[in-house]
Amino acid sequence: MPILCSLSNDGATRYNDIKRKMGSISNTMLAKSLKELEEDGLVKRTEYMEVPIRVEYEITDSVRSLIPILTELAVWGKQFKRKLIF
């Protein structure tokens, strides 16, 4: 989820920029997560044949359609949390 949210906010993003935003995630875990998201059709990987090779990741249209639902879920979660505190 954090990867998808980051890509949703930032658009096409390079690997090192994603890693920086994810904080303490290991290279192995980030690479594995991105590969799984790509295989599931949630993330698109674009490789540019430059020197050095540039790779960017971005969310797919199916994730874009999911963002409003996730936003509503986040709003609900905040409201629910407030009810627990009071």
Image: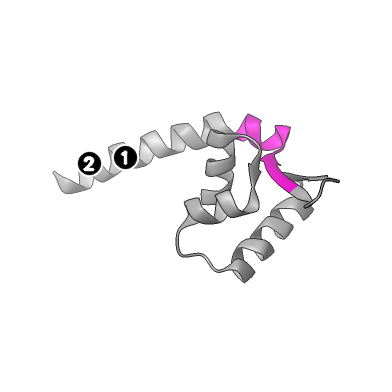
Residue 82's label in the rendered image is 2
Residue nearest the observer in this picture, 52 or 45: 52
- Provide the residue designation for mark 1: 78
Residue nearest the observer in this picture, 80 or 68: 68
The answer to whether any part of residue 1 appears in the image is no
Colour scheme in use: one colour
Q: Are marks 2 and 1 in contact (CB under 8 Å)?
A: yes
Residue 23 location, x and y as percent? 45, 59
Amino acid identity at mark 1: Lys
The answer to whether any part of residue 37 appears in the image is yes
| Residue furthest front in the image | 51
Determine whether 25 is above or below 84 in the image. below
Residue 26 location, x and y as percent? 55, 69
Which residue is at a point 56% across and 49% down the rendered structure image? 17
Quadrant where the C terminus lies?
top left
Determine whether 24 is above or below 13 in the image. below
Residue 34 location, x and y as percent? 68, 56
In magenta, the rendered stretch is 55-66
Residue nearest the observer in this picture, 57 or 83: 57
Q: Is residue 22 magenta?
A: no
Element marked by disc 2: helix
